[in-house]
Amino acid sequence: MAEQYATQKQKSLGIILHGDKLTGTQAKEKNEMLFNQFGINYDKLPEMFKKGSCVFRNKVEEIVKIDKSGNPVKRCKQIVTVDYVDIIGPKFWNEHPYILHED
């Protein structure tokens, strides 16, 4: 077990030290290297390992009380959220436009 770990660590270090192997390669080539050297299928990794963590304030509506008529009184508040999403494409920004705008 220790020998397998040492071998894996040595391979990882080799990739880090020889990062120039990755320069100019396409995602498909990087995924192939990841699979060939470590047996890791990039497409099957959880999202948190693909794009990293994104921390932002998410707007949520919260019921703060019930009025005399029995209707809920709602307020908007922002909560700190950690998510694993692609912030490069438009989907994230369309869903959270308030992040870039001051109230």
Image (cartoon, helix red, strand yellow):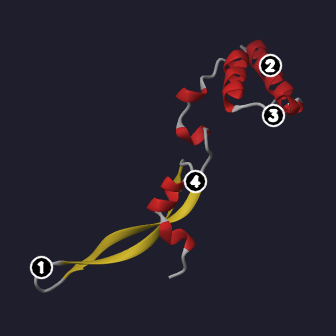
Which residue appears at 61% of the width and 38% of the height? 49
Tell me the mark number nearer the camera, choosing from 1 and 2: 1
Residue at mark 2 to residue at mark 3: CA–CA distance: 29 Å
Tell me the mark number nearer the camera, choosing from 4 and 3: 3
Q: Describe residue 60's horizontal placement relative to residue 66 as left or right.
A: right
Amino acid type indicated by mark 3: Gly
SS for dot 2: helix
- Count every numbered label the image shows and give the total: 4
Q: Which residue is mark 4?
A: 87
Amino acid type indicated by mark 4: Ile
Crowding near pointer 4: few (<14 within 10 Å), some, many (20+)?
few
Crowding near pointer 3: few (<14 within 10 Å), some, many (20+)?
few
Marks 2 and 3 in Cβ contact (< 8 Å): no
Crowding near pointer 2: few (<14 within 10 Å), some, many (20+)?
few
Q: Which mark is residue 6?
A: 2
Amino acid type indicated by mark 2: Ala
Which residue appears at 72% of the width and 21% of the height? 33
Q: Describe residue 41's horizontal placement relative to residue 71 as left or right.
A: right
Q: Which mark is residue 57?
A: none
Tell me the mark number nearer the camera, choosing from 4 and 2: 4
Q: Which residue is mark 1?
A: 70
Counting residues from the N terminus, which is met first, the one under dot 1 or under dot 4? 1
Marks 4 and 3 in Cβ contact (< 8 Å): no
SS for dot 1: loop
Q: Could you say which is closer to the camera, residue 7 or residue 57?
A: 57
Counting residues from the N terminus, which is met first, the one under dot 2 or under dot 3? 2
* Res 10 quadrant in image: top right
Counting residues from the N terminus, which is met first, the one under dot 4 or under dot 3? 3
Percent position of residue 47, x then y: 54, 39
